[in-house]
Image (tube, grey):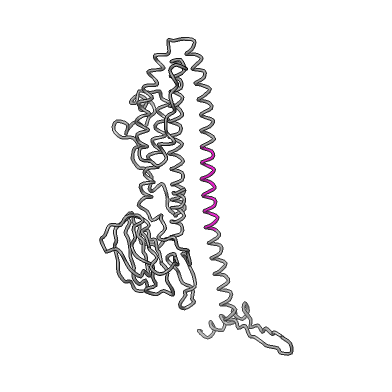
Amino acid sequence: MREEQGVVRRSLIDRWFPERHIFLRSGGDTRGYVLTGGRQMAMACVGVAVAAWTLVASGGFIFDMVARSRADDEVVRARAASERLNADLQARLETAVVRMTATTGGLDDMAAMVERRHAALTGVMGMFHGVDGAEAVLAPAKPLAADQSSPVQRIVAVRMDQERLIQRAGDFAQTRAERLRLAFRLAGLNPAAYGATGASLGGPLVEARDPKALATILDVDEPFAVRIRHAADNLSEMRSLADVADDLPFDRPTQARTTSGFGVRFDPFNGRPAVHQGQDFAAPLNTPIYSTAPGIVSFAGVRSGYGNTVEIDHGRGFKTRFAHLNSMAVQPGQRIALGQRIGAMGTTGRSTGVHLHYEVWMNGRPQNPARFIRAGEQIVQ
């Protein structure tokens, strides 16, 4: 029975990969080469593997381009909507100027509304304290000079500035949040899993999801309360994603050039295909190596194949590994800050030359470090 199965298998191989003879003639000499079925099968397997890897790499590249393009389109649409809203507000406020100029009865009401809006707006602006770039974007306009404008004009100017500030606050937070969400997607992470889960405003505003309730609490008109809630929600999500991003390995371990990426490659020692679970960086001996996120050193010593190795636990299931170091500057249990020097590049362990082997792990599975580095570059932008 086994002999019959072997004959059938051999027959199929001969049918798909028959023995071929190649003759090369050079001058008066003729040389012949024999391509057996086994060699042809090996060549076909290599070709299929290369084609599959090319498709996977191309798919990942196209996915990244599409993600970036979508994020840019969303930013453009948000800016266009903001410009249309500002134009509409300008028209409505100019109409209000005309009405108030004709009668002084609404002046006190307008002044009281402006004061209440100012109090609510002050609370929202305080939430942006410490956010990079917020102070310049959300700076209030200079008030009109008293000797060059009427009280009505000054009140309307303040109200227009309030409208501008709350719109800018919402756009600023939304744009930052979009950039952070794109960075998380580039790293292969779901931003929804790391976004804000609680209410964006504290105290009595926690349960004020209804615009009418929020307007009553803040003592402002309902449309303004809706915009305050919108800005606060965007800011809350932005802060949540930014806080998580500060703890994830989005930085580069070194500025050295990349020599080998994540995925299947030919092993430099035996020449056979093997999975490379990290990214290699090459530079001169003792080039400084830095931590890519804050964390605690979970291992610092010698690992089989890795040589001198430092491993850092960043929490949330993330861990980084730095291998082939020439020296180590940290100890197990030590708390590490972002960008802190942890060692020097070397060639210890299973290494063919001076380089850093860098790995990123999430929940016990190796990830592509290049995706996290691209995410970090997106956040910096």
Say which residue appears at 40% left-offset and 15% top-offset: 109
Q: Main secondary structure of the magenta part?
A: helix
- The image quadrant that residue 355 belongs to is bottom left
User: So how many labels did they put on this image?
Assistant: 0
> Residue 96 at x, y = what percent?
49, 17
248 or 188, which is in the foreground? 248
- Along the horizontal axis of the image, is 378 left or right of 299? right
Q: Is residue 372 above or below residue 145?
A: below
Q: Is residue 303 above or below residue 100?
A: below
- Along the horizontal axis of the image, is 2 left or right of 334? right
Magenta region = 59-78
> Residue 87 at x, y = what percent?
53, 27
Q: Is residue 303 above or below residue 196?
A: below
309 or 344, which is in the foreground? 344
Say which residue appears at 57% left-offset and 77% top-offset: 41
- Residue with the most extreme front position: 147
98 or 262, which is in the foreground? 98
352 or 53, which is in the foreground? 352
128 within the magenta span: no
- Residue with the most extreme left position: 333
> Residue 227 at x, y = what percent?
42, 30
Q: Is residue 227 above or below residue 370?
A: above
- Residue with the most extreme bottom position: 28
> Residue 288 at x, y = what percent?
38, 63
